[in-house]
Amino acid sequence: MTNKKILITGASIAGPTIAYWLHKYGFDVTVLERSPAIRLGGQNIDVKGPAKEIVCKMGLEDNVRAANTTEIGMRFVSPENHILAEFPKESSLSMTQELEILRGDLVKILYEHTKDKVTYRFGDYITSLDQQADHISVTLASGLNEKYDLIIAAEGIGSSTRKLAFGSDPRFKFLKLYTAYLTIPKTTSDSRWARWCNVKKGVVFMLRPDNYGETRASITFLSEEQKYRELPLAQQKEILINRIKDTGWESDRLIAAIARTQDLYFDKVSQVKADKWSTGRFALVGDAAYCATPIAGKGTDLSMAGAYILAGELFRADNHQDAFAAYEQRMRPYVDKCQRLPPGVPGLVYPTTSFGVRLLNSAVYLVGSRPVKWLASLFSSKKKDVQPEIELPDYERQ
């Protein structure tokens, strides 16, 4: 397929990535973003595995490396702030990766790399669409009516365009967790080490350094499904504050920060389980198709791998039906693997009692001991020739 006019909705990670590759393959690309500008908020993300491979293919490794968050590893601490275990980023057990970057910084890098190659339009979105045999007609919130050969939704888990195309939402798997993110002022207790702390009430606090002299905080806790996201910001803050009140560690500091912040993100943690990722001339990529949640740690990998493969299959195929089918055939096994969580997760990682916290912390202390670390290093040293998580074909040479 060549010389096709494609509309991409969403300018986060998957959107600019697929826009880059489609442009490279000769497509006419427009990226539509509901926000008035690129959204630069968010927490740490890892650029590893397929995401790192794609970043390198795009010539952006140096850009990503230059925007490193400065994090040197992860420390697990007790509610009294005693270090239980320490995993530097070189460790096979560390959550900190070689290329650790803020979500907003990666979005900015991708946007800057594509803004002169494709058309970006901000502050607009699709309100209706009508599929025909040879095109899709769309009406935008701005009142414009336009025609495209294909539409690709690279939106978030709550994609509104997905519902317009499919007529309903896919199945969501709620993990019985809620999470909140915010940026807080750095204090003397913060360093280049990230800190993870389990406290009672099934709460996990995480504080991580960034490259702007501030600290990125996340608060995750067990909960039955509620409609917190639909509440006004003031009520969301009240609920979050009440949940972490009197839990110890640095909860008082976080409560004060929550009361002041204007960049709070607070939502349930759910996976997207879509039976199909395309309908007619419309396709999904990234979180809108197969969100794995931050618990899986594979969001960036899935978004960038899906974008790369979908673009490549559209370039290689004779028609969009074959391209969409090949994209799903290639991605579906990888998505299923990434969405598969270890037994007992998340429940075991979020104990609700002080005794449960002490028990978990004892296990963390054991894993962080020198003998266990040594054994882990021996095991990881045998994996020098690790097979790629998913094959990323060189579509231009095929």
Image (cartoon, rainbow, N blue to C red):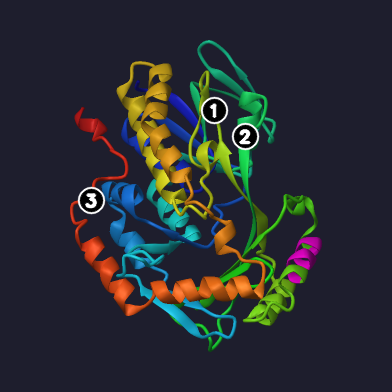
Q: Residue tagged by mark 1?
A: 275
| Amino acid under disc 2 | Arg
Res 41 seen here? no
* Mark drawn on residue 386: 3
Residues 8 and 165: in front is 165
Query: Of helix, strand and loop, which one carries label 2?
Result: strand
The magenta region covers: 234-241
Residue drawn where x is 55% and y is 32% of the image: 274
Of 180 and 20, the residue lying toward us: 180
Viewport quadrant of the N terminus: top left
Question: Residue 137: x, y in percent?
Answer: 60, 20
Q: Spatial distance from mark 2 to mark 1, Cα to Cα? A: 8 Å
| Lower sequence index among marks 2 and 3 | 2
Answer left or right for 123 relative to 90. right
Q: Quadrant for residue 397, please give it.
A: top left
Element assignment for label 1 = loop
Reading the image, the residue beneath label 2 is 171
